[in-house]
Image (cartoon, rainbow, N blue to C red):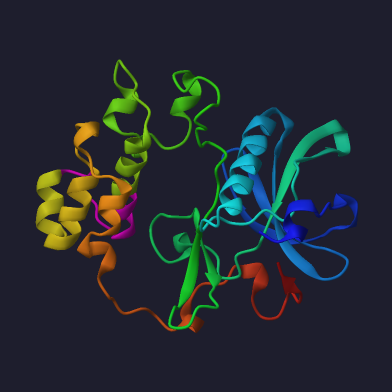
Amino acid sequence: MSSRSSSWMLDPITLRKLGCLGQGEHGYISLVQTTDGLLMAKKTSLRKYSENLEKEQRILHHFNSINFNIVRPTSPIVYYETMPFNVKICSIYMEIAPHGSLGDMIIKAENMLIFPTYTHGELCELKLADFGLAKEPNGPNPLDGSLFEGCPAYLAPEAVGPCRIISSAVDIWSLGVMVIEMLGVNGGGRNDYLSQTLSSMAWDFVRKCKVHDWESRATAEELLSHPFVNQSIGVPPFEMLPVPYCLTDGVVQGRFF
């Protein structure tokens, strides 16, 4: 991570708001620009959700320090502001994804952002975003009600059972659900429907993600070597990738972080 991204402080008052990039359950994301033309995304929530943003900021900095494909923060802290009518908000700043999210092309996966790549032979670079509801290993007790925030369909069986076992296997289950939705498959996730609808390779991958016994579920290392992940497939031309509305038609001119 660059020294600028880890130590650069912003003055929210000087930032120019250019448009809205999206809205979620607890806030919204807007496109802003610094006085020297740098574009970035501003994620804003009411102050009562500040713990989620503080946690998300910690996660972003942690993974960027070990060079994971995670969206980069553009400032190291959470900013607190008081708006008109005494509305108290908090915000974090991140690099802007100039080609939106996979959610612009498929049913789900709005939290996978699309960036241009500088690696020869690759079409684009995907980065994960939105860690406001993520669980930290040493964070608050995961057995409280906050576990059930977000989308219940992504929760593994052991996460909602009487023992509520929380481990990396929970993320593997969620990955299987996301792959099903990315493939545009309905049928409520029933195994009989999926096995008849998906290719044998895709079904084998999903089946290994959605094993009910969490101790027998595939690990991330095993899935990375699966043929479904390693297969070579065609990709659309770069110019066909989505672009957020407020970045199209030359409406916004500026530099990317």
Would residue 59 be counted in the magenta stretch? no
Q: Residue at x 12, y 61 (%)?
A: 200
Task: Compare residues 88 and 220 and report the one nearer the observer.
Answer: 220
Residue 251, compared with residue 143, is above or below; it is below
Expressed as whole percent of the image width and height from the top left, the position of residue 202 reads 20, 59
Quarter the C terminus occupies? bottom right
Task: Compare residues 6 and 194 and report the one nearer the observer.
Answer: 6
Q: Residue at x 90, y 57 (%)?
A: 14
Q: Residue at x 51, y 37 (%)?
A: 134
Q: Is residue 131 left or right of residue 91?
A: left
Corner quadrant of residue 210: top left
- Is residue 180 something one can see in this rendering? no
Q: Is residue 19 left or right of residue 8?
A: left
Q: Residue at x 22, y 59 (%)?
A: 226
- Is residue 7 something one can see in this rendering? yes
Would residue 185 be counted in the magenta stretch? yes
Expressed as whole percent of the image width and height from the top left, the position of residue 32 reads 76, 60
Task: Compare residues 228 and 23 and report the one nearer the observer.
Answer: 228
Span highlighted in magenta in the image: 178-190
Expressed as whole percent of the image width and height from the top left, the position of residue 197 reads 14, 58
Residue 209, compared with residue 214, is above or below; it is below
Corner quadrant of residue 45: top right
Expressed as whole percent of the image width and height from the top left, the position of residue 178 reads 34, 50
Quarter the N terminus occupies? bottom right
Our reading of the magenta stretch's main secondary structure is: loop
Return the residue found at the far top. 162
Q: Is residue 233 left or right of residue 33?
A: left
Residue 38, compared with residue 221, is above or below; it is below
Question: How many numbered discs sit on the rendered protein?
Answer: 0
